Image (tube, grey):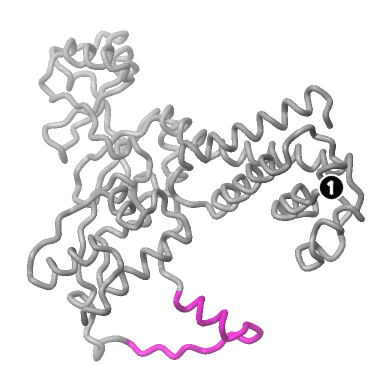
Amino acid sequence: MTEEALSDIEELNSVYADLTEGRTAKPVTIRNFLWWFGAQRRTENNVRYINDQLAMVGIRTIPDYQGVWVETPITFELIADHQEDESELEIVEVVPSPGIPAEEQVLASDAPAVDPSYTIGEISSANNVPVKVAPNATLSEATTLMLSRNFSQLPVMTNERDVKGVISWESIGLRTSMNMSGPDVQSYMESPQEIPASASLFAAINTIVEHNYVLIRAPDRRITGIVTATDIALQFEEISTPFLLIAEIEKNIRIIIDKKLTVADIRGACAVEHLPESFETAADLTFGNYVRIFENTACFTKLCLGLNKETFTADLTEINAVRNDVMHFNPDPLTSQDLKSLRNMASLLNKLRRIGVF
């Protein structure tokens, strides 16, 4: 590789230098890795840029930075060091699909083979090494840990890979009520429930619903975390909140437009190429159309919202960017600022509706 072909990212060039000189590159968390590129989240545009920079220097991350928890440490390797010998590769003839433009077929063939499934390993609690007790620990030690940390269960382990069972308030109560108590923790434990970190989140839900938890086992066989029913509820809240706020914002905007504007008003605010061929209500429009309508002075005046047009439309433009980000189903949660922007806009529109502005 020539000097001119190096990446624009200084840290990536440093990794390349280490690898080509036979040194092991220092591991880094995915979050810090993203910061190298001025990114906070793995959005579609960020991922495209990062992949281009990695390809430029011939490096890949181990594991792939796109499909695991953002605090996971990753290492690096030169792609050339692990390419298969071309003479051993099977030659596959690519047959064009009828009816699909050539440029689209090229894009499809070049698409990265990244598993789009949301895995259990992407949840924060799946990556927090659980508190554990030894099989010969006293029941008092286990219950004290559970009470002081507000746990419902504890894995019973001899080391980070060897799980003997799980002790819980339910297992303790059941055995105590049947006079089956014993001197140590192993007398109260039950068979452990565990799944690999690569398992689909949805595949894990049934187990968690039935047993209230599941232990997460990494590819190197270590137990890396425990995911409970509470963790799943919090995860779905994190995932669903942006969608619910956006739905609330859009519904209010549609009410405003449908109540106060005509089809002619909308056509006057939006260029023909940005409008559906035929539309009857605001529900037929895109969010980009909404922004253009509110940016139009005649329409904004007719809406009579009592707001400053420049400030409101700037906020609405920001909401549109956040909406596009959310609807691309990025693996990382929104930043606190983006979530705050959604909450603020939803609150503003609700207040206006409540006092009868629309």
Query: For residue 12, which quarter of the picture?
Result: bottom left
| Residue at 57% in and 39% down | 242
**Residue 78 rendering spot, x and y as whole percentages:** 20, 71
Residue located beneath label 1 in the image = 299
Q: Residue at x 11, y 32 (%)?
A: 158
Tag count in the figure? 1
Which range is magenta? 90-110
**Viewer-proximal residue among 285 and 167:** 285
299 vs 197, left or right, is right
Compared to residue 316, the image places residue 152 above or below, namely above
Residue at disc 1, secondary structure: helix
Taking 167 as reference, is 30 above or below it? below
Q: Quadrant of residue 315?
A: top right
* Quarter of the image where one finds residue 146: top left
Tell me which amino acid carries mark 1.
Answer: Cys
* 99 with respect to 203 (left or right): right
Residue at the left extreme of this rendering? 22
Q: Position of residue 73 (x, y in %)?
A: 23, 49
Above or below: residue 195 compared with residue 328: above
Which residue shows up at 89% across the image and 46% down it? 261
Q: Quadrant of the N terminus?
A: bottom left
The stretch drawn in magenta includes residue 240: no
| In this picture, residue 131 sits left or right of residue 34 | left
